[in-house]
Amino acid sequence: MKYIKLNRMYCLLISALLVWSLSYPIVRGLRVWGPRFFINNVIYDKSFIAQNYIDRYKVFFGDVIAALLIEMDAISDSKKYKVVAHADQPNFVSHKGVGEQNIIFIIGEASNVLRYNAYSYKRPTTPNLKHWRDDGSWCALENVHSSASQTRVAVPMYVSFADPEHEAYLFNYKNLIEMAKDNNYKTYWLDAQDGQGLWNKPFGFVERYADIHASPHINNTPFKIIEGKDDNLINPVEFYFKNAQGQSIFFIHLFGNHLPYDMHIDANDNGEHFDAYDKSIHHVDGIISKIKILADKNLKNYKMIYVPDHGEVVGEGHGFPSNRDEMYLIPFMANNDDSCRYMEKFRGEDGFVSSNDVKYLILHLLGYDISDEKVNYEKSNGYKIKDYQENVIDFRNLEHIKPVQ
């Protein structure tokens, strides 16, 4: 009898330890994310929860649970992320006529404006951008903040009608690629980031609408793109610039300045007193210069915009709890003054322009008008951003980080 009681006690103890062990990743996720831990698992990817098991158990419970959840996710994605033609567009958008001949929209990654010497930084990290700004051929906006600190949230706001208050607009309305096609544009999406998985799926969804898409796993071109290698984009850029006919829009999405920084540099990026992040900024400056040279040679008549998805806390990353604004501070530069003047319409009373408004500039270049009421609304509400848990917060309440010298 004593033996049976002892065995029962051991069984209860082992069961309790097993329950605690299996529930720990859920508890940890809730501690960090709160209710968003479950919401994000539904919105983005079933591996949002599974990843915690993989991190905790590596190959045992993690792999088994992840496999089951990811299989469920694949079934869900076949419906949610299915490429379908959207019929509707917001009522604040109207068609005004023919757009620009060629539009090049370069989206950077994790790029802190405080490290650009085209702005206030003293080290020569962006010699090309600075030269173009100094000679007046490019304009730059001061005081621009991103609308989110994570790529999967920020990039869809550039290429769809999603905004900090309306995530679902990514699926409810036409995206910018569809809007471009409606106005007779050939559409290209060239990407050094993988448009699949938990972190990239939302913008990969939009990428699939493009006529031509070249990225690590979404690719209908002969060009091989390795994730994280922005230089791989230069060959397809050159090819499609050379062969562009009619009106074209190019979405070029860089891996940019994401950690680890030394993955994205080469010997040409060495500079006096440069740290690894400075070198990665310098490399992006070189990539933009190569794209510009190819555009000058092959397209001639074009409008180019460069803006990153969000900023970066150098050495730490982005998308984590912080009461400072550094991971939201970004540059905005364009090869024409009209683009900067258009964006100034959205500058709020706090002195900042939100990156959420870049979509309206792209629509303007595509030949669409945005109503005055919408412009005024965005001007008054540009302070609304998404935090690391994807809750809407007030940018004005964050501690402002001063430029480093």
Image: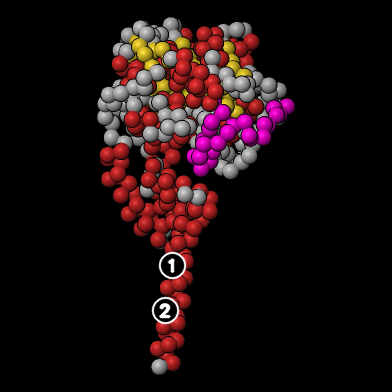
Front position in the image: 106 or 376:
376
Front position in the image: 178 or 118:
178
> Could you say whether the residue bearing mark 1 is in a helix, strand or loop?
helix
Q: In which quarter of the image is the C terminus?
A: top right
> Could you say whether the residue bearing mark 2 is in a helix, strand or loop?
helix
Residue 75 lies in the magenta stretch:
no
Instruction: Give the percent coordinates (x, y) of residue 52.
Output: 46, 53
Q: Which residue is drawn at 53% across and 26% down?
A: 381
* Residue type (three-letter) at the residue carrying disc 1: Val
Q: Residue at x 43, y 14 (%)?
A: 371
**Which comes before the other along the chain, label 2 or label 1?**
2
Q: Report the residue that reaches farthest toward the front.
A: 373
Residue 394 lies in the magenta stretch:
yes
**Would you name the residue on which mark 1 appears?**
19
In this picture, which residue range is highlighted in magenta?
Answer: 382-405
**Would you name the residue on which mark 2 appears?**
11
CA gap, disc 2 and disc 1? 12 Å
Vertical placement of residue 180 versus 159, above or below: above
Front position in the image: 389 or 350:
350
* Residue type (three-letter) at the residue carrying disc 2: Cys
Instruction: Give the percent coordinates (x, y) of residue 74.
Output: 30, 45
Instruction: Give the percent coordinates (x, y) of residue 236.
Output: 38, 21
**Pointers 2 and 1 in contact (C-beta within 8 Å):** no
Q: Quadrant of the N terminus?
A: bottom left
